[in-house]
Image (spheres, grey):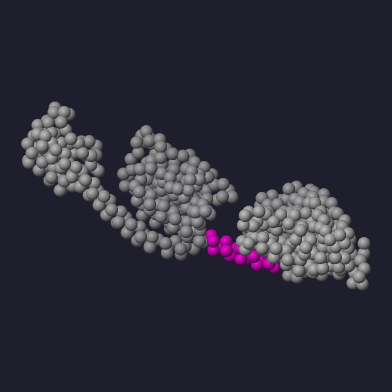
Amino acid sequence: MTIHQDSSELLAAIPRALDGVAVTVLDVAGAPSARFGVFEAAAAAQASLRAELPAGAVVADLANACPEAQALVHALLGVVKERERLEADMESMNDRSMSLLEQVAMYTETLPQLSAGDSDAAVARQAVEACRRAAGVRHVVYFEYLQDKGGCVLAADYGDLVGAGRGELDPFLPAEGFLGDVLAGGVPLVRGVPRGKRLGEPGSPERLAEKIVLGVPVTYGSAEKRVPLGVLVLIDRSDGRVEVRADDGEDGVGALGSWEIDFAVAFGAMLGAVLGARKTVSLGKEMSTARTIQRQVLPERPAVVAGYDVAARYEACGAVGGDYFEYVPLVDGRTLVAVADVSGHNLASGMVMVSARAHLRTLATVHSCPAKLFSAMAKVMHDDLQRTERFLTAAAVALRPGDGAVEYVCAGHNDLMIYRAAGDRVERVPSDGTILGFMPDVAYAARALCLHPGDCLLLYTDGITEATDRAGQMFGEERLAAVFAQLAPNRSAQRVVDGLATELENWRGGAANDDDVTAVVVRFEGLRDGGSKP
């Protein structure tokens, strides 16, 4: 029956009550499913009334009816049309309510199971099994997205699709085609399979579909910082009721019901939440370990060099930073005060920093010349920096106890600032040298500097000069030089460093660091008897 019983009884009563009226009920295909009264086909085209229904239509033959009867039939068909619409809405609401109850039950059952999985693979396997049962599809596949490799790896698949075994799915696929479209769009994507054709390339999940394929992005995080984890792919309904026209060359959005899509989206969100939480916990452990290592490798106290006062301050913008400072003893008795900045300020940058510190200390045992030491650093670190797509800027000064003659070497780092007590001014030594990581064979050259009592050196990273205020204006090198000139006279190295930190904090207006911040101040005090070597 195309229409409900009450509507059918009303339509059947119309010919009995009104002379000259016949009613025909049509199904969705336009074929008659019921007739009431005598329908005169020849006259129907001249005097008929049609009302579209949610599941078909009603046609009334009014050729032999008086005008009053025609008006009454018009009103009655309007009542039937509205009643059928309300009935369809009520059925949809009832079905939707049942679907929601099923979803809640399924989530209640599945979420604890996923959370208890002992590995990401086990979580993915449980998710695809539960998703297949809930959505009523023949096969479900989950591909994990590997951003660093630019593709997706087969993580779990489950179903009874004929001929669909692991052997027919490539274990790794580039983030292209259907999978790439889902990842790029970030929303569910449904595609119908034109009759007699196939989608995608051999080995792809969409290739297994006979009628319909649905891809759901699996992500983690907020909308602003959402991280793609993979793609959940649903293939064909298990009841086989999905039909796609042979000429369907567009996405078959209507071929799967909204409930199936809702189920898939919900499972994708649930899988993303569990896998994302697992990755966060794992990353948290790694970050904690890295933070501990980084704290251990940074100097605990200032370098002790006769005739010098040295102080430093370091602030990471995150759990692990890419800045670095170090006091390294050289084989000729001097102390190398070094500052470095690894590109980025995340876990990878922090690990590169730890590696740089290890290389620097090792090479310092065989190189007393700062320039040769930096050349050796460029050679041993080049491959690692290239592989991790990082680079490293660095600068260092070599201090000899009681001697104001200093050697300075730079590898593409910020300008060195020197406060000259005699002239109460700040000099800037321009940056030079090649950044570490660009070339394996670099010949660095050292500069000779002469300090007098009261002179100060400032080594720093760009986290200071690039710090912004609330209007977005950078602190800048000119402002740093002016602040340094005000702080340096007659103050200890520690007071100068603390003063710089205070000025920077005031400039930011309490906002958090956007980059790691490092500053090292070296103050030359001369010999204890008041003299100094030139």
Where are the magenta residues, as a range?
A: 279-298
Query: Is residue 293 on the magenta stretch?
Result: yes
Residue nearest the observer in this picture, 237 or 245: 245
Quadrant of the rendering where the N terminus is positioned: top left
Residue 34: percent from left, percent from top: 15, 39
236 vs 450: above or below:
above
Instruction: Answer whether residue 35 is visible to the viewer in this image.
Output: no
Horizontal arrangement in the rendering, residue 307 relative to residue 107 (left or right): right
Query: Is residue 42 on the magenta stretch?
Result: no
Residue 381: percent from left, percent from top: 73, 54
Residue 230: percent from left, percent from top: 49, 51
* Total residue callouts: 0
258 vs 453: above or below:
above
Residue located 39% across and 39% down the image: 193
The picture quadrant where one finds residue 100 is bottom left
Residue nearest the observer in this picture, 60 or 131: 60
Residue 79: percent from left, percent from top: 18, 45
445 vs 29: above or below:
below
Residue located 54% across and 63% down the image: 281
Horizontal arrangement in the rendering, residue 240 relative to residue 363 (left or right): left
Horizontal arrangement in the rendering, residue 314 relative to residue 177 (left or right): right
**Main secondary structure found in the magenta portion:** helix
Residue nearest the observer in this picture, 83 or 263: 83
